[in-house]
Image: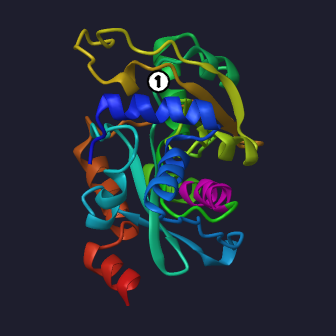
């Protein structure tokens, strides 16, 4: 249900006066006006042994269920990618994924010491994974950082097996903003996992780099840039692209099929 702009403005005014976020304001108003009491459940700290990551297709219904709730709209993913369903204590609680690195970002380029020569940089970028999605719907303390750490270790192995390139590091981009419940999205889980904040993007204008109109406020927004290197692993200097090699495409697809779990198998595992 979408909230009207006047209602949102009224919530913000109430929150400013009473020191609450939008969620807290709604809770207070419900209690004050209707006598409804709401208490947030206090979950125990997350346990590493209860976390599992299942590689799935983007079309997997459990994946799409969580993906649709992410603050960045789903505009598809181009290039190399591996997406995972996050399982905690046997239940699906979110999604996390990795995809091809973006081509242009100066703070990231400086951090990884990428070449200024286009062809060399294009090759090097194949060893950097972009954390393109991270949506967690179970607020157990420390769970986000546990998942992020496990994801890094998991995708490094899967990425090298499928695409044949060693991973030298990671990047991600976070839209910083105050959330409805008063919390702030600023990449805290990345900092807890020892990622470095590298800078801030310029954000899109009214058009993107391909001169297409950009209407999404999220895309137009400036983003915090985070990065993390893998110690001892250099950027790749050689890479065979698959798009012009049908045989290599077949090999990659075969390896993907070995790793990506069947939708029915995933559903049975989660619901049994």
- Which residue is at the front of the view, 154 or 195? 195
Q: How is the image coloured?
A: rainbow
Check residue 152 for magenta coloring.
yes
Check residue 87 for magenta coloring.
no
Q: Magenta segment range?
A: 143-155
Q: Which residue is mark 1?
A: 122
- From the viewer's perspective, is 227 left or right of 209? right
Asked if 158 appears above or below 243 in the picture, the reply is below
The image quarter containing residue 127 is top right
Rendered residue at 59%/44% (across/down): 167
- Which residue is at the front of the view, 3 or 52? 3
- Which residue is at the front of the view, 135 or 150? 135
Rendered residue at 28%/48% (across/down): 249
Give x and y (percent) for residue 116.
Answer: 57, 10
- Graded by Cα atoms within 10 Å as few (under 14), some (14 to 19) or many (20 or more), the crowding at tag 1 reads some
Secondary structure under tag 1 reads: helix
Asked if 113 appears above or below 132 in the picture, the reply is above
Give x and y (percent) for residue 245.
Answer: 27, 40
Number of on-image labels: 1
Locate the C terminus and report the quarter of the image it occupies.
bottom left
Rendered residue at 58%/66% (across/down): 39
Q: Would residue 241 be visible to someone looking at this image?
A: yes
- From the viewer's perspective, is 62 left or right of 191? left
Give x and y (percent) for residue 223.
Answer: 53, 24
Give x and y (percent) for residue 208.
Answer: 32, 13
């Amino acid at each position: 249900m979408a909230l009207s702009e006047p209602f949102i403005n009224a919530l913000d005014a109430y929150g400013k006066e009473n020191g609450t976020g939008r969620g807290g304001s709604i809770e207070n108003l419900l209690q004050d006006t209707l006598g409804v009491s709401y208490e947030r459940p206090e979950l125990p700290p997350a346990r590493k042994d209860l976390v599992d990551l299942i590689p799935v297709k983007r079309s997997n219904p459990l994946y799409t269920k969580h993906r649709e709730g992410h603050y960045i709209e789903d505009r598809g993913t181009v290039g190399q990618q591996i997406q995972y369903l996050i399982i905690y204590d046997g239940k699906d609680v979110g999604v996390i994924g990795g995809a091809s690195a973006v081509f242009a970002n100066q703070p990231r380029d400086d951090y990884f010491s990428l070449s200024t020569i286009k062809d060399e940089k294009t090759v090097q970028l194949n060893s950097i994974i972009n954390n393109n999605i991270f949506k967690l719907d179970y607020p157990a303390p420390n769970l986000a950082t546990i998942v992020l750490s496990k994801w890094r270790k998991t995708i490094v192995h899967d990425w090298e097996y499928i695409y044949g390139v060693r991973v030298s590091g990671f990047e991600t981009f976070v839209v910083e903003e105050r959330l409805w419940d008063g919390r702030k999205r600023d990449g805290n889980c990345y900092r807890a996992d020892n990622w470095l904040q590298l800078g801030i993007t310029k954000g899109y204008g009214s058009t993107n780099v391909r001169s297409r109109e950009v209407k999404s406020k999220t895309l137009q927004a400036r983003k915090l840039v985070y990065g993390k290197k893998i110690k001892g692993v250099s950027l790749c200097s050689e890479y065979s692209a698959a798009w012009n090699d049908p045989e290599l495409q077949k090999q990659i697809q075969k390896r993907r099929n070995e790793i990506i779990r069947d939708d029915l198998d995933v559903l049975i595992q989660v619901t049994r």
